[in-house]
Image: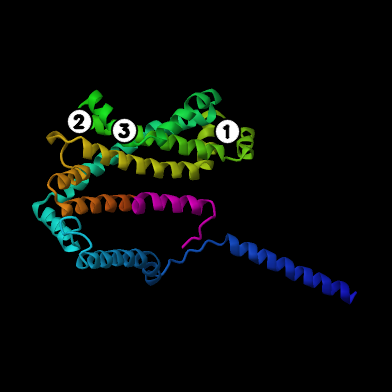
Amino acid sequence: MASTETTAVKDGNDLDGVEAGLDALETVQTSRTPLRETLTRKVLPPVTAIVLVLVVWQLLVWAEVAPEYKLPSPSDVWGEVRESWLQGTLFDYIWTSVSRGLLGFLMALAIGTPLGLVVARVRFVRAAIGPILSGLQSLPSVAWVAPAVLWLGLNNSMMYAVILLGAVPSIANGLVSGVDQVPPLFLRAGRTLGATGLKGTWHIVMPAALPGYLAGLKQGWAFSWRSLMAAEIIASHPDLGVGLGQLLENGRNNSSMAMVFFAILLILVVGIAIELLIFSPLERWVLRSRGLLARS
């Protein structure tokens, strides 16, 4: 009898331990990460990398590994930044390109999302268009600049056409990849609950395909931005204004490597800012919603 009671007590303790562990897993961590830890983990590494790049860059200039007209010093590039700031053109350069890039990306999003759903869900359309989308995705965006200029002329419509041709295939293919990875059990469960047609697409397919779709969006933005830079470098006109690509081309025409490096720096800054402000928060939200990222 004593042995039986001891076993029962032991089993009860084990069960309590399992329940406590499950409760701990379900508990949402609401405490905020200390500011010092945030600075150490997220701010210090990129700042350190930037400082190292600047130090190596300056050392190469001092070592005279290349003539000054080929490799400007960081101070020369900073001089270009300061001059554009004083002239009030710095934000004009950035806004001209960013406004085009974001509007073109939104247009590509509106076209690529339904196209990706149709390709993913309709076998005949997939067999007919799927290989074409893959081929378009591998085609360099710069190849579309010349025909776009001939078809549409030197205007913003040409810029948007190049962006669409570069970004739509990536967004559509990303969504197709995400839909292909949706477990069939989800679809059967949705049909059992009455989620069919558009309702099933909205409530079952799209949420389940979100990770692949988000990857396609990130790649679509990268293609949008690169397509726009190619179009701005090749096609210049006073009515188009001076964007970052045109600024880069102006530096080449003026044989000013400081201006070239200045334009490259702005292009990188915009790309990093879009990643940090838009896509990184979206990615963290998706991971948290699936329990793949600890809450902080």
Image location of residue 84, percent across then percent down:
12, 53
Question: How far apart are the two marked residues, 1 and 2, measured between alpha carbons?
Answer: 45 Å
Quarter assignment of residue 236: top left
Quarter assignment of residue 229: top left
Image location of residue 24, percent across then percent down:
60, 65
Image location of residue 151, percent across then percent down:
25, 23
Q: Are marks 1 and 2 in contact (CB under 8 Å)?
A: no
Crowdedness near tag 2: few (<14), some (14–19) or many (≥20) residues, C-alpha within 10 Å:
some
Q: Amino acid at mark 3?
A: Ala
In the drawing, does residue 34 fall left or right of residue 82?
Answer: right
Question: How far apart are the two marked residues, 1 and 3, measured between alpha carbons?
Answer: 43 Å
Residue at position x 23%, y 52% from top?
A: 266
Residue at position x 24%, y 29% from top?
A: 157
The residue wearing badge 1 is 195
Q: Secondary structure at mark 2?
A: loop
Question: How far apart are the two marked residues, 2 and 3, measured between alpha carbons?
Answer: 17 Å
Does the magenta portion include 32? no
Does the magenta portion include 281? yes
Front one among 99 and 79: 79
Front one among 111 and 271: 271
The residue wearing badge 2 is 155
Q: Amino acid at mark 2?
A: Asn
In the drawing, does residue 222 fall left or right of residue 183?
Answer: left
- The segment highlighted magenta reads 275-296
Give the mark, 1 or 2, whose residue is nearer the N terminus: 2
Front one among 284 and 266: 266
Give the mark, 1 or 3, whose residue is nearer the N terminus: 3
Q: Are marks 1 and 3 in contact (CB under 8 Å)?
A: no
Q: Which residue is outermost to the right?
A: 1
Picture disc at residue 277 = none
Picture disc at residue 143 = 3
